[in-house]
C-alpha cells in the first residue's frame, strides 16, 4: 500500500468515526504519522482527500466486481448475487463514505465530489443493466431501466434505514432478499409495457462519454490507442459488432476491465 493510500485509509476511518466536517487536516496528519505540512505534499485540501476516497473506494469495488465477473465457474445469477453482497458489505464497512454518496451530502462537500458521485452512480446502473440482461436474457431488455431503478431504490432505502435507524440490521440477508424481489418484478413485467424506454442515441452518447473517461484513465499508449480506435468505431453510423466485441475482449484482460460491464451495458452488448 502506497503512502497516499495509507492516508486515504486513515481519513476514511476518521470520517467514519467523527464525520467529514468534524475531522481536520491536522488530525488526518497526526493519525497518518505525518507533519501537517507533509500531508499537503499528498493532498492540497480535505476536499481533495474526499475525492480520492470516493475514487479509491469505488475503484476497489469495481475491480472486485470485475474479478467476480471473470469467474467462469459461476452462473450470471451467482455472479450478481456475490457482487450485490459485496456492495452491501462495503456499505457496512464504510457507512460514512456511502452516506456522503447519498442524497445531497456529496454536493455539500464540493462540486467535484458531486460530479464524481454522479459518474459512479451511472457506472452502478450500467452494471445493473448488463447483469440483468445476463441473468434474464433478452426478454428483460425493454424493462431493464425500470428494473434497475426499482432495485436501486429498494437497496438505497434499506441502506438509509440501516444508516439512520439505531437498531441492528440483517445485512447478510439483504442481497438474497432483494434477488427474490427482483425475480418477482421480472415475472410481473412479462405482460406489461415499460415505463422508461431504451433510448439508443442516449446510450451511444453515454458509451462515448465512458470511452473518453477510460482514455483519461489509461496508463499506457497502447491501451489509449486501442480506446481511440474503439471510439472511432462507435462513432460510425452502424458500428461493427464483431470489431467492438474484439475490443471489449482485449479490455477485459487489461487494467481497464472494471469499466467493461458498464461499457457493455451502454453498448447494449
Image (cartoon, grey):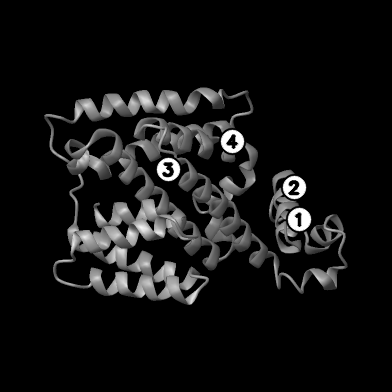
* CB-based contact (under 8 Å), mark 1 and mark 2: yes
**Which of pointers 4 and 1 lies earlier in the amino acid sequence?**
1
Residue designated by label 4: 163
**Which of pointers 4 and 3 lies earlier in the amino acid sequence?**
3
Q: Residue at x 51, y 54 (%)?
A: 104
Describe the element under mark 1 as helix, strand or loop: loop
Q: Is residue 217 above or below residue 117?
A: below
Mark 1, residues whose alpha carbon is within 10 Å: few (<14), some, or many (≥20)?
A: some
The answer for how far apart the CA atoms under marks 4 and 2 are is: 15 Å
**Which of pointers 3 and 2 lies earlier in the amino acid sequence?**
2
**Which of pointers 3 and 1 lies earlier in the amino acid sequence?**
1
Q: Residue at x 38, y 27 (%)?
A: 179
User: Which disc is residue 186 wearing?
Assistant: none
User: Which disc is residue 18 wearing?
Assistant: 2
Describe the element under mark 2 as helix, strand or loop: helix
Q: Nearer the viewer, residue 179 or 194?
A: 179
Residue 236: quarter of image: bottom left
The nearer-to-camera label among 4 and 3 is 3
The answer for how far apart the CA atoms under marks 4 and 3 are is: 29 Å
User: Which disc is residue 69 wearing?
Assistant: 3
Q: Is residue 109 left or right of residue 238?
A: right
Q: Is residue 124 left or right of residue 170?
A: left
* Horizontal and vertical percent position of residue 241: 20, 59
Mark 4, residues whose alpha carbon is within 10 Å: few (<14), some, or many (≥20)?
A: some
Residue designated by label 1: 23
Quadrant location of the N terminus in the rendered image: bottom right
Describe the element under mark 4 as helix, strand or loop: helix
**Which of pointers 4 and 2 lies earlier in the amino acid sequence?**
2
The answer for how far apart the CA atoms under marks 1 and 2 are is: 6 Å
Q: Nearer the viewer, residue 130 or 173?
A: 130
Amino acid at each position: 500500500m502506497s503512502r497516499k493510500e495509507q492516508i486515504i485509509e486513515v481519513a476514511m476511518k476518521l470520517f467514519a468515526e467523527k464525520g467529514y466536517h468534524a475531522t481536520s487536516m491536522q488530525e488526518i496528519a497526526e493519525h497518518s504519522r505525518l507533519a501537517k505540512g507533509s500531508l499537503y505534499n499528498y493532498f492540497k485540501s480535505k476536499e481533495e482527500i474526499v475525492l480520492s476516497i470516493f475514487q479509491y473506494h469505488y475503484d476497489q469495488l469495481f475491480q472486485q466486481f470485475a474479478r467476480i465477473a471473470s469467474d467462469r465457474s459461476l452462473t450470471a445469477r451467482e455472479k450478481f448475487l456475490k457482487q450485490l453482497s459485496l456492495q452491501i458489505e462495503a456499505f457496512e464497512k464504510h457507512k460514512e463514505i456511502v452516506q456522503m454518496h447519498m442524497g445531497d451530502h456529496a454536493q455539500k462537500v464540493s462540486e467535484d465530489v458531486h460530479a464524481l458521485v454522479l459518474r459512479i452512480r451511472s457506472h452502478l446502473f450500467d452494471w445493473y443493466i448488463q447483469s440483468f440482461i445476463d441473468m434474464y436474457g433478452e426478454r428483460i431488455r425493454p424493462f431493464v431501466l425500470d428494473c434497475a431503478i426499482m432495485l436501486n431504490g429498494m437497496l438505497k432505502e434499506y441502506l438509509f434505514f440501516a444508516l439512520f435507524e439505531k437498531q441492528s440490521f440483517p445485512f447478510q440477508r439483504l442481497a438474497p432478499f432483494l434477488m427474490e424481489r427482483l425475480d418477482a418484478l421480472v415475472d410481473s413485467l412479462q405482460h406489461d409495457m415499460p415505463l422508461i424506454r431504451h433510448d439508443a442515441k442516449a446510450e451511444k452518447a453515454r458509451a462515448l462519454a465512458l470511452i473518453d473517461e477510460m482514455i483519461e484513465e489509461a496508463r499506457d499508449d497502447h491501451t489509449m490507442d486501442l480506446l481511440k480506435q474503439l471510439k472511432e468505431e462507435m462513432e460510425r453510423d452502424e458500428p461493427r459488432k464483431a470489431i467492438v466485441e474484439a475490443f471489449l475482449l482485449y479490455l477485459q484482460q487489461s487494467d481497464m476491465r472494471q469499466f467493461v460491464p458498464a461499457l457493455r451495458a451502454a453498448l447494449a452488448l
